Image: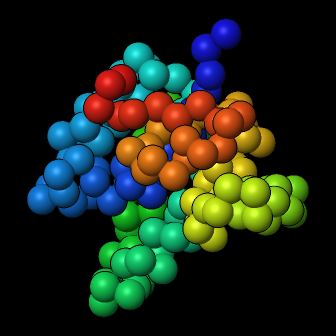
């Protein structure tokens, strides 16, 4: 059975930053989502939250951040995984068991609540045995 993945922050940042070393891979990934070649892909709400915090820490304006999130949410074929109390509780267990960072645990938990797959180059996710990690450069 084909898994339905979620996208983590690394691909969002890479898509929106042409200078990012993963920009080409992120662009191809989002082209496949838009064309329908990759279907039912979602972004966890936690990734939007992390994006806002990262961009604010870099001095970006609230308006620019909001515009970016609105643009991402308008991509055809791209869904959203809500941040629920179940996701939060599961994330806490993942941090304890596998030493993930706060946001990585939220993204992993969201993926596990969604369909158990995440698109990311972050090797830390590979420590979670029940999570399928998909490298965007290989899609």
Q: Residue at x 61, y 62 (%)?
A: 100
- Residue 80 location (% of width, % of height): 62, 47
* 58 or 76, nearer to the observer: 58
At a point 38% along the width and 87% down the height, the residue shown is 57
Q: Which colour scheme is used?
A: rainbow
Q: How many marks?
A: 0
On screen, residue 39 above or below 115: above
Residue located 41% across and 77% down the image: 54
- Residue at the far top in the pictured view: 1
- The residue depicted at 72 percent of the width and 51 percent of the height is 109
Where is residue 69? Give x, y as percent.
45, 62
**Residue 6 versus residue 138 in the image, above or below:** below
Q: Which of 107 and 29 is in front in this view?
A: 107
Query: Residue 66: which quarter of the image?
Result: bottom left
Residue 23 in the image: above or below residue 91: above
The x, y position of residue 50, in whole percent, is: 52, 70
Which quadrant is the N terminus positioned in? top right
As rendered, which of 95 and 67 lies closer to the eye? Answer: 95
Q: Position of residue 49 (x, y in %)?
A: 56, 70
Which quarter of the figure is the C terminus placed in?
A: top left
Q: Can residue 74 be seen in this view?
A: no
Q: In this view, does 118 lie to the left or right of 38?
A: right
> Can you see residue 126?
yes
């Amino acid at each position: 059975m084909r898994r339905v993945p979620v996208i983590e922050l690394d691909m969002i940042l890479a898509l929106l930053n042409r200078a990012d070393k993963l920009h080409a891979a992120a662009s191809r990934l989002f082209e496949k989502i838009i064309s329908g070649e990759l279907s039912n892909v979602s972004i966890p709400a936690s990734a939007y939250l992390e994006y806002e915090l990262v961009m604010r820490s870099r001095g970006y304006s609230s308006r620019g951040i909001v515009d970016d999130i609105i643009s991402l949410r308008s991509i055809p074929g791209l869904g959203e995984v809500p941040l629920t109390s179940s996701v939060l509780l599961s994330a806490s267990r993942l941090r304890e068991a596998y030493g993930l960072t706060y946001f990585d645990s939220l993204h992993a938990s969201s993926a596990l609540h969604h369909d158990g797959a995440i698109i990311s180059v972050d090797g830390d996710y590979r420590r979670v045995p029940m999570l399928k990690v998909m490298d965007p450069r290989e899609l």
